[in-house]
Image (cartoon, rainbow, N blue to C red):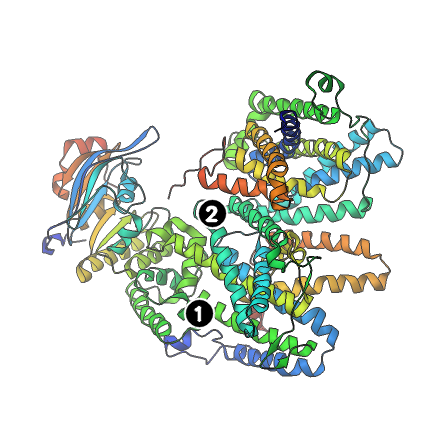
């Protein structure tokens, strides 16, 4: 009743290809933007920012990166955390060695380093597919993290291997409160999210999906397989790299290789699967889910007096079960469920 | 259906295949096949199942590389065709088992057919400014023309996986047409269709040939269709060529009758 | 260079290679029969070892614990086939693979939930002491345990290889791996076959888990052993039993040799990534592995 499209006609291809063609969606998004940028900073607690919103945004960005590679371009990757690590260390080293470099530039350069590594380790995708490719991405994960630990130059010869991240500053303004960090991360993530949405709607996104769906046919219609796959690796790694830099600077406060383990790669993969492969919104939904689930489980554990060890094992089991559940019931994840809900909403209160 | 081929003017030879031999491991798919295709004509390839017809099309647009033989395309002598080069030089095709991108809508699938004509790079597309934006709209207009031509407006936003077989085949034709090809290779475009769908498809093929002058090489089992719309026919059997000529010549060729015809489909 | 030392490292590598081969074998079995790459094999190794050890801690004799664990693993395998695999029967391989990733997390959580997360010691009654005979005759130090473990693995592997190629069930398994529908069409009882396969894979997991576990203690890290099986399979081919063995041996030896001879120059820790990078390079040259089947895609 409220969500009807009736009366909303499009008279040009421009308006037909908007990101949010339905007016109610546009109002919804506008509302969300207002809440995100103004409402939340006014009411939320520092805990909410530091423990929930900031990691949610950072993981959304990483999940978006992985979604571009795996969801849109169909190249399964188990090494996303490694690219995040490259981004973090890249940003750190640029800020360390280039005096006065702007904060955003160092993040971007960290992302570019990650993109370069992504290009290199994406080369196997030209020869292998499926889980052979996944296995080769494991090589990326293990090798990169090992290299960042062993090559002392990256950690600036620190004795403990754990470096404190530099303060974040733009034009003299320090981003040291949770609210400030949140807003910075929000701006970066929403901008990159918008760029990603534009890419997947355009020719490059269609080329990626073509390669994913049937690469032989894609080749026949003239899509350059090598360039398309490598571009997917590069863009995906850039996104993961920036996410990794934000992870270090806006969340952990330290730059350490151990934070970017295989476990993190799996978590990001889960976000993408649960949220929805091949969906920008799905990346955000999946990240929200994975960030909130441990919090919910922990609160449940506290209220019912289960030990933390049991709770963390339960968490593993719930994660695993949910992955299987989503793959069986709704392979397109929460994003698809959201779409179905919206379609039902269009007809509400009528059943069909 | 009336035979309108006499009103078409076939041009010069645009594609010449000489002594093509292709084998997979020990299996010989094609043995010493030679035939040519003239510009603006409709050339049919027929033959029993397993005769090597699809393999022949695959050789023409570079999916398979023949072990022997030569391809002369628009005057250029080639040892074999490269898929990307084939697409770039105006060869488009459809597949026997529908090679559509199941995860995308009809509109997006046909838009992929325009990919070679898109110039802007991914950064401009990410920002969706100026050239990228204009280009997207321009190509959308062209694609909508194809959609109008094939009368599939009502399903343009439907994911192709959900469409019935006949419509999927039409969408695949649309994707090939969107590339504005010079040569269109059609692999059993009417397989699995009922009479009405076949009539529609025939109409589309004839229209494409007459309106745009596209050369068409087509594999088809329906003899009625083949005899009615093609200018010339090549007959394959067990990877060898056993007939080559106009539909009338083929109809009366004893080898062909023995191998294949006998009962009209 | 000390030749004796080289041989020790080489043999040590070969022996750990045999162990890798054993874990890889579990993968090959399931892949051959159901076309699924079972990422959860490592978790199954962990679960099997943990169950067995925990039962002995309750006072059960070892042979009874092993027997009970085999039964439990069979039940687990059947449950997995029923709940996870059957609903996903027509999905692309990637979905199945990701489902097994989820499964591995589930089994890991379940194992620790049931039996606790402490490291458990496992005593199989075989000592980890050098073999007297070899030490005296060739001046090489090789652990008795390793040799016996290798012997067990060799036995198991030979048995399985024969099973696949000589028996009716083995043939049926290969048919199922090739084409489910066709196998059904000739009357092969799919569910039974899968049940058998997962039980055998569970048994293999148990043997691997016990051997690894008694060497390094039964702990969560055991699941990462399974990850090492991936390079083994890449080298050997996903569908080949001899491939798993040879792949395992190559990975085991090269990993040890690299760590010992190249490691000191670059700060050590090479074992963590060397097998994967090796597999990666191998993939570029020969994507189907040494013994795998080349897949021709026709459109």
The quadrant of the image that shows the N terminus of chain C is top right
Does the image show residue C88?
yes
Q: Nearer the viewer, residue B233 or A230?
A: A230
| Location of residue C141 by image quarter | top right
Q: Pointer 2 indicates a residue of which chain?
A: A
Q: Nearer the viewer, residue C5 or B238?
A: C5
The tag on residue A124 is 2
User: Left or right: C264 with respect to B83?
Assistant: right
The tag on residue B126 is 1
User: Left or right: C113 with respect to B261?
Assistant: right
User: Left or right: B162 with respect to A172?
Assistant: left
Label 1 CA crowd tier, 10 Å (few <14, some 14–19, many 20+): many
| Location of residue C239 by image quarter | top right
Q: Nearer the viewer, residue A348 or C160?
A: C160
Q: Secondary structure at mark 2?
A: helix
Q: Nearer the viewer, mark 1 or mark 2?
A: 2
Q: Residue at position x 54%, y 47% from top?
A: A134
Instruction: Point out residue A291 in the picture as x, y percentages from the top left corner.
Output: 68, 64
Instruction: Point out residue C281 in the picture as x, y percentages from the top left corner.
Output: 49, 41
Q: Residue at position x 71%, y 54% from top?
A: A318
Is residue C292 depicted above or below A46 in this figure? above
User: Left or right: C211 with respect to A305?
Assistant: left
């Amino acid at each position: 009743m409220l969500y009807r499209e009736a009366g909303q006609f499009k008279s040009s291809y421009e308006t037909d290809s908007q990101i949010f063609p339905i007016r109610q969606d546009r109002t919804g998004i506008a509302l969300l933007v207002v809440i995100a940028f103004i409402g939340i900073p006014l009411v939320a607690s520092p805990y909410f920012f530091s423990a929930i919103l900031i990691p949610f945004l950072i993981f959304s960005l990483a999940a978006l990166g992985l979604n571009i590679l795996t969801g849109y371009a169909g190249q399964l990757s188990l090494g996303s955390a490694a690219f995040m690590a490259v981004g973090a260390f890249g940003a750190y080293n640029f800020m360390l060695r280039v005096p006065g470099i702007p904060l955003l530039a160092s993040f971007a350069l960290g992302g570019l380093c990650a993109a370069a590594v992504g290009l290199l380790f994406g080369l196997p995708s030209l020869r292998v597919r499926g889980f052979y490719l996944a296995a080769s991405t494991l090589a990326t994960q293990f090798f990169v993290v090992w290299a960042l630990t062993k090559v002392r130059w990256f950690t600036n010869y620190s004795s403990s291997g754990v470096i404190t991240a530099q303060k974040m500053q733009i034009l003299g303004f320090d981003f040291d409160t949770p609210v400030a960090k949140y807003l910075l991360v929000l701006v970066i993530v929403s901008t990159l999210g918008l760029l990603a949405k534009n890419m997947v709607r355009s020719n490059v996104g269609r080329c990626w999906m073509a390669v994913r769906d049937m690469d032989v046919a894609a080749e026949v219609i003239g899509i350059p397989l090598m360039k398309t796959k490598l571009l997917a690796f590069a863009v995906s790694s850039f996104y993961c790299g920036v996410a990794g830099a934000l992870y270090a600077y806006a969340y952990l406060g330290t730059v350490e290789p151990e934070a970017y383990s295989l476990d993190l790669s799996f978590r990001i993969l889960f976000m993408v699967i649960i949220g929805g492969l091949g969906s920008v919104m799905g990346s955000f939904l999946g990240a929200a889910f994975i960030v909130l689930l441990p919090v919910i489980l922990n609160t449940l554990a506290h209220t019912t007096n289960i030990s933390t060890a049991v709770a963390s094992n339960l968490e593993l089991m719930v994660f695993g079960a949910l992955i299987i559940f989503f793959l069986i019931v709704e392979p397109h994840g929460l994003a698809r469920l959201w779409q179905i809900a919206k379609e039902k909403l269009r007809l509400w209160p009528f059943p069909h | 259906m009336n035979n309108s081929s006499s009103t078409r003017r076939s041009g010069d030879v645009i594609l010449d295949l000489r002594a093509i031999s292709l084998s997979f491991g020990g299996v010989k798919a094609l043995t010493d096949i030679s035939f040519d295709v003239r510009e603006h004509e409709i050339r049919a390839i027929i033959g029993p199942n397993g005769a090597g017809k699809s393999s022949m099309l695959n050789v023409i647009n570079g999916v398979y590389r023949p072990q022997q033989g030569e391809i002369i395309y628009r005057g250029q002598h080639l040892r074999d065709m490269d898929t990307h080069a084939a697409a770039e030089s105006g060869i488009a095709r459809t597949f026997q088992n529908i090679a559509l991108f199941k995860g995308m809508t009809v509109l997006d699938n046909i838009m992929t057919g325009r990919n070679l004509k898109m110039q802007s790079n991914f950064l401009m597309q990410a920002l969706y400014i100026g050239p990228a934006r204009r280009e997207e709209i321009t190509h959308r207009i062209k694609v909508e023309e194809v959609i109008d031509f094939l009368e599939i407006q009502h399903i343009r936003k439907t994911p192709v996986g959900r469409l019935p077989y006949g419509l999927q085949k039409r969408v695949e034709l649309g994707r090939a047409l969107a590339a504005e090809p010079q040569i269109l290779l059609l692999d059993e475009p009417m397989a699995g269709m009922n009479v009405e769908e076949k009539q529609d498809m025939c109409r589309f093929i004839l229209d494409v040939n007459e309106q745009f002058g596209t050369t068409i090489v087509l594999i088809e089992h329906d003899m009625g269709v083949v005899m009615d719309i093609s200018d010339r026919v090549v007959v394959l059997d067990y990877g060898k060529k056993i007939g080559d000529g106009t539909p009338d010549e083929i109809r009366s060729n004893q080898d062909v009758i023995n191998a294949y015809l006998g009962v009209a489909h | 260079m000390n030749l004796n030392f080289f041989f020790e490292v080489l043999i040590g590598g070969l022996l750990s290679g045999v162990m890798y081969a054993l874990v890889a074998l579990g993968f090959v079995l399931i892949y051959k029969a159901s076309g699924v790459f079972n990422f959860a094999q490592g978790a199954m190794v962990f679960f099997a070892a943990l169950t067995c050890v925990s039962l002995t801690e309750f006072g059960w004799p070892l042979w009874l614990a092993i027997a009970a664990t085999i039964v439990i693993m069979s039940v687990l395998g059947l449950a997995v086939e029923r709940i996870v695999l059957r609903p996903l029967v027509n999905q692309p391989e990637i979905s199945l693979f990701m489902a097994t990733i989820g499964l591995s997390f589930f089994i890991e959580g379940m194992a620790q939930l049931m039996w606790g997360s402490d490291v458990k010691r496992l005593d199989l009654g075989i000592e980890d002491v050098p073999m007297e005979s070899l030490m005296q005759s060739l001046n090489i130090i090789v652990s008795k345990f390793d040799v016996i473990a290798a012997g067990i693995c060799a036995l198991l592997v030979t048995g399985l290889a024969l099973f696949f190629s000589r028996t009716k069930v083995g043939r049926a398994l290969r048919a199922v791996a090739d084409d489910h529908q066709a196998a059904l069409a000739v009357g092969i009882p799919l569910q039974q076959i899968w049940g058998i396969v997962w039980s055998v894979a569970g048994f293999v997991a148990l043997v691997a888990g016990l051997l690894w576990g008694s060497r390094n203690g039964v702990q969560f890290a055991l699941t990462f052993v399974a990850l090492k099986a991936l390079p083994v399979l890449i080298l050997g081919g996903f569908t080949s039993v001899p491939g798993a063995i040879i792949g395992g041996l190559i990975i085991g030896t090269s990993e040890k040799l690299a760590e010992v001879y190249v490691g000191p120059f670059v700060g050590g820790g090479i074992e963590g990534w060397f097998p994967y990078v090796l597999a990666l390079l191998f993939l570029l040259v020969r994507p189907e592995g040494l013994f795998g089947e080349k897949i021709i895609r026709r459109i």
